[in-house]
Amino acid sequence: MENTILQTLIHCYQHSPSLVIIMNTDWEAIWANREYHHLLNLPMQLGIPSDHKENSVHRFIFEGTLQECRLLCNLLDGYRIAEISPCANEGHTSLRMDVDEITASVQSMTSACHALFNELNELELYDQTPLLNTMIGSCYRIYRMAYLQKEMERLQNGRRRNTIFSVNTAVRTLYQKCRDILRVCVDVTLENCDENLYLEGDMDEFMMAGLCAVTLCCRNCNHFQTLRISLTMADTAACLLVHSEQENTELPDSIQHSGDCEGEKAILTLFCQQHSGKWMFAEQPENKFRSCRIIFTPHSGTVDNLTLNSPRDIQEGRFYNKYETMLSCIHYRRMF
């Protein structure tokens, strides 16, 4: 009977112009009408729980294009059907975030702020400087969306660097950057692993996963927080734990802002799929804490050529680097 239902569904959808994926109740693909790549963890991409049961329509960004997913859930027969096609606006064109255009616009606005700052200094209008820093904060948050999308597309398309790097050193760098940027609103501590751990892959992907864990734990809070970053090793798996707790001290001028976390979740998923790992997020509002745990398999062979620093860290400037950009949803440092 099940095979008859499946064959009927395949017959109905095999010539559909949309991408159609037939899955079981665990969201595992059984059949698709054509090849597709980089569509990982569909519930997370759609922003729905894994036990979603309703027939529904969702819009989501996939490879820089706004897509519409018509989701049919027939749990009685054990099937979920996702019919995915580009969204069309009134002009029947796909909506796309042009990351290069956004980056150029942010650079232009930043240059204008620098020019205005110099003019205000000449006029001795120093009281206007906070307004310029507020404008820069808005630039950061605009650029952050483009940066997240660009990083997701890089990883989805397999453009990873492949080196062996020290996880201990990378975690120490993550701690130092978070401490330096967030010190006015977050107290950051580090518990590094005594054992030397290494990972074969892209150091920037690991750093982005760590930054995503930090933003999941610390964003959307107008109180001072404590943040603990710890790296441990048990059996054959390593664990990076990011744990935040909210203190009673309220920040007078909150620089936090709300927003979804789908980009962060997607990058964490991509990292874990690359390194045979998994990630988990827990939150207890009544106890005012959040935790994000990233479990991955470290490099187990010999280490000959070790990468100590990310090449992108060297290329990125003082502002608009990945640390300042990703953490800007929690706090951004004054440019002026």
Image (cartoon, grey):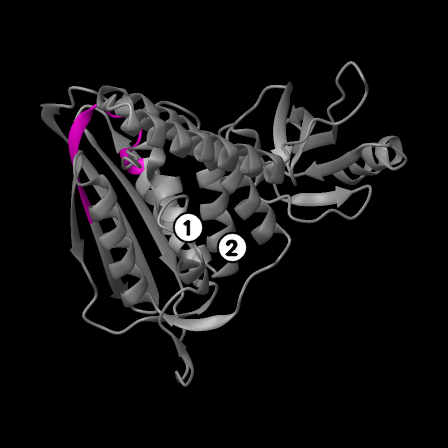
What amino acid is at disc 2?
Gln
Q: Nearer the viewer, residue 184 or 38?
A: 184
Residue farthest toward the front in the current orientation of the protein: 122
Judged left or right of residue 101, residue 303 is left
Q: Is residue 225 magenta?
A: yes
Please tell me whether mark 2 sits on a helix, a strand or a loop: helix
What amino acid is at disc 1?
Met
Residue 179 position (above or below residue 286): below
Q: Which mark is residue 273?
A: 2
Residue farthest toward the top in the current orientation of the protein: 90
Start and end of the magenta stretch?
Answer: 217-228
Residue 148, how many percent across, how many down? 50, 41
Q: Residues within 10 Å of mark 2 (few under 14, many from 20)?
A: some
Q: Is residue 195 magenta?
A: no
Quarter of the figure with residue 55: top right
Tell me what residue is drawn at x 67 percent, y 31 percent. Answer: 96
Residue 178, how many percent across, how many down? 25, 47
Residue 190 position (above or below residue 33): below
Residue 31, how many percent across, how many down? 76, 44
Q: Which mark is residue 208?
A: 1
